[in-house]
Image: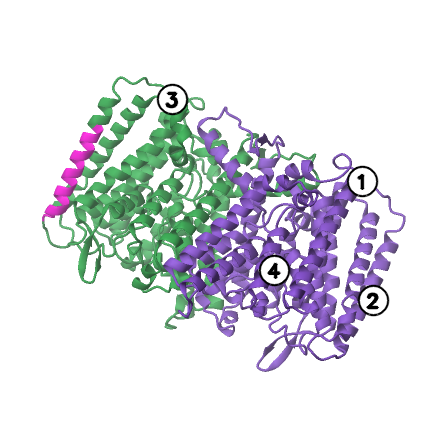
Chain colours: A purple, B green
Amino acid sequence: MNHRLVFRLLGTISWLIGLTMAFSLPIAFADVGGQAEFESRGFYALIASIAICASVGLVLRAAGRSAPETLYRKEAMAIVGLSWVLSTILGAFPYFLGSVVYTSTAGAEVPMGVAESFFESQSGFSTTGATVLTDIENKRWVPRCILFWRSSTHFLGGLGIIVLFVAVLGQGSAGKALMRAEIPGPSKEGSHERMQHTALVFAAIYCGLNATLALLLRFEGMTWFEAICHAFGTMATGGFSTRNASLGGFESRAIEYTVIFFMILAGTNFALLYFTLIRKPGRLLGDPEWRTYIGVIVVCTMMVMAVGIWVTTDFNAQGNLSTQEEYETAFRDGLFQVVSTLTTTGYGTADFDLWNSFSRALLIVLMFVGGCAGSTGGGMKVIRHILFVKILRREVDRSYHPSVVRHIRLKGESLLDPDLPRNILVYFGLVALIFTLSSQVIVGIEPDSTWIKAGQPVSNKLIDTASAVAATMHNIGPGLGIVGSTQNYAPFTALPKLLFTFLMMLGRLELFAILVLVEPGFWRER
Amino acid sequence: MNHRLVFRLLGTISWLIGLTMAFSLPIAFADVGGQAEFESRGFYALIASIAICASVGLVLRAAGRSAPETLYRKEAMAIVGLSWVLSTILGAFPYFLGSVVYTSTAGAEVPMGVAESFFESQSGFSTTGATVLTDIENKRWVPRCILFWRSSTHFLGGLGIIVLFVAVLGQGSAGKALMRAEIPGPSKEGSHERMQHTALVFAAIYCGLNATLALLLRFEGMTWFEAICHAFGTMATGGFSTRNASLGGFESRAIEYTVIFFMILAGTNFALLYFTLIRKPGRLLGDPEWRTYIGVIVVCTMMVMAVGIWVTTDFNAQGNLSTQEEYETAFRDGLFQVVSTLTTTGYGTADFDLWNSFSRALLIVLMFVGGCAGSTGGGMKVIRHILFVKILRREVDRSYHPSVVRHIRLKGESLLDPDLPRNILVYFGLVALIFTLSSQVIVGIEPDSTWIKAGQPVSNKLIDTASAVAATMHNIGPGLGIVGSTQNYAPFTALPKLLFTFLMMLGRLELFAILVLVEPGFWRER
């Protein structure tokens, strides 16, 4: 392993994080609550954090001086995994040094500890959007400049996924087969120039969409501060808001429909967005993954609407809406929640925890689906599910017709990569194993009293915990019950918070880049 | 497809079922409740059912006259699947024709309908032990002779699995690799004589263990009727009892420890039991699957005890036990429930639904593990989990070291079957898919009012349904909440009951034999 190269690149990432922190500094002076004031606590916390990032960067780059340029597979994996670990640690300093208050017990304000700071930092970078902060509108608890840093971690995390992970590493096993032919660029597969070109194009699309959305939200009634934070949260499929009631706090249909549209874009393969921009929309409309993605949104929204209107009264609980209003609410809330969950954004406009069991179960299932490969969306990705079903179908056929080897076909072309079926199945197996083990461990170490203190029924401990594990490992954010859309992760004790932090990182990097880091053989072998 | 051969063998199975029914006839005259009486309703229902079995057998054997003897893979699969479907239908007649009362609504007795009869019949043959009967101690509701038929279906189902499935078909993908070398017999692998010999040996062990257990239970205080029914329920890993409080109704430590021991035997590979009988116990003690199986029992029992004693008061809820009594109760109840769940028997001595969330979650996880391959136990089998973890481990290594192909090793020998990893992963994938889809569908079609009527909180609908799906598809029986150990499947509406019936069959035959039956290509192609 070429350690020095790893060090040098990690040093650059430290500097990049420090640089991004600097953009939050002006907010400390800004007029954010209708009253200009200097938030000294947040300001000095950011200054100190920037100094730390700069020093760590200096040390790492010094350690990596005159490293050879060659990047092998192992170094690439190590850099991706370690850069996420490093970002989480560095990104946690503003919360920790700023003594951000996340909750209060018996009237006393509780500042964020190490576990809370890591959690919030990782939740930002992994574009999860799960939070431990119970009152983000309280400026005395959470300085505005640190709230802006919180949303900036979404932007940086989304950029990291789109550039580092998608463009440079070919975005994991699932998308690789598809993307090889799809990635835009002047030269042949795998070449350095082509990768750089792709990364630049993707980054430009990402920044452009962020700017467009911020502009739209500004004109739809948000302040610039709110508009930029929510653009960051949407395009990264993150979900951090500036309101305690999430996006629902704005009570604006225009804003909700706008965010729905941009969430759908954020969950779309960026290569397909590129083709649409260069006036080849056929590539987007004909793409099997995107068609399935849209199909899932349409079908699930219809099911949520149908059950919520005809079987229960989820969308008219007070009984004060006309039939037309109820249908519009059902459409808007249903679509919003389905898109928010599928794209793994996690914004909320309705408390879906009050919905019927069928719709809640459906949202949990959607957490396991996720966005398209090559997007900022998390989760397992739509393409993996398409291939998963095709592979299982083929294996059932094979059980009575062993001699027939049918290739998995997608869009009429057969996928010849012989490793693809195994990779897909292994991915599903790992997800099932990690999900089950993590849920079991957290049910074991988190005491029942957490539920009692949070005013939640202890009988829901199993399902709440399972939903929290799914919501973190697939980078959604909110789950059911104690971590429901109007709740947060504050009640959990430190150890489960750290486990959730690990799960967010694991899911965001599609398991392998993190799993190898905890595998002794990875570091031992050459 | 050689249809006539399929018909002929199904005809034989019809006769076998009719013959077994005849063994329940004497019970109609017996002194079962301390008072001799003739249960005419049950008697005539059995006579009519036997006549139906005989006629169906006649017709099928006539249709299959002079069929060629050759049995190809497709015919074998069709026979296994269809024989289970046929058994379920024929086995349901006594319940249906006997107008067995399964519950009462508003004081009125409700006789078993088509869905209830299929459910109870399938639950017996598949050795699941899930029931719709709410009062089996009421002789007016459930005639004793039909209750004996109910337990006989366990015996027949267990025998079917051990003989047809394990010995003849080589027990599916997972065990095959192990069993090839293990199956006892005079001649070489796959030969007709060897299969016949193996089948006979296994059947003899199975019947011998049933007789031994019945004898033991008789001397530990049960009546002959109860002893035989519980021996059938234990050795088939079924779980049908003759008491409403299941095995706990006898309140006898001797009986509980005896049943624990025999459940462990029933979940053990019968080939290993054979080697132990011929004084080669080293094969049993050195077997990696059996060692893991015992290890799981020990570790899980210890965890259930530890949490139940030190964190909660699960085993001393009334606070009236001494420390020593509490430890003994914790050991006995914990071990019983772990063994009962792991072996997929489903007998109960304690209401584990009152246990803490950790222990309940652990039992749900154990439902997905199951017994050893080559046993009467259901579930996914321990060996599949061993290989699953080994395969995932190898794939994580492979992600950074693509050139290394390590063989999966078991007991020091590498398993060279190149299809094995894929088969294991496909099995896990199918289980995950079927589990998720079925839970979602049942949450959708079963109304919330079912929970309200059963006096269960609607907020538990998701977890209860998921546990019911796991408990049926892995052939355990009881689950959580509405299908908890003191409850039953009576409250469900007809459609979910039929879906549960399908799941029991699917799980029992390890998915493929049933999945191909609903695959159009299976019937179309030559």
Label 1 and label 2 in one chain: yes
State the CA–CA distance, disc 1 to disc 2. Answer: 34 Å
**Which element carries disc 3, helix, strand or loop?**
helix
Which mark's residue is nearer the viewer, 1 or 3?
1
Against B60, residue A94 (above or below) is below
User: Are the two marked residues, 2 and 4, in contact with CB atoms closer than 8 angstroms?
Assistant: no
Q: Nearer the viewer, residue B488 or B359?
A: B488
**Which element carries disc 1, helix, strand or loop?**
helix
Question: What is the chain identity of the residue bearing mark 3?
Answer: B
Which mark's residue is nearer the viewer, 1 or 2?
1
Return the disc, 1 or 4, that comes first in the chain's sequence: 1
Q: Which residues are magenta?
A: B38-57
Q: Position of residue B1 (x, y in %)?
A: 37, 22
- What secondary structure prevails in the magenta region? helix
Q: Position of residue A412 (x, y in %)?
A: 57, 31
What residue would you read off at disc 2?
A51
Horizontally, is B474 left or right of A283 in the view? left
What residue would you read off at disc 4?
A500
State the CA–CA distance, disc 1 to disc 4. Answer: 38 Å
State the CA–CA distance, disc 3 to disc 4. Answer: 55 Å
Label 1 and label 4 in one chain: yes
What residue would you read off at disc 3?
B192
Return the disc, 1 or 2, that comes first in the chain's sequence: 2
Label 2 and label 4 in one chain: yes
Within 10 Å of the Cα at label 1, are there few (<14), some (14-19), or many (20+) other Cα atoms? some
Residue type for callout 2: Ala
Which mark's residue is nearer the viewer, 3 or 2?
2
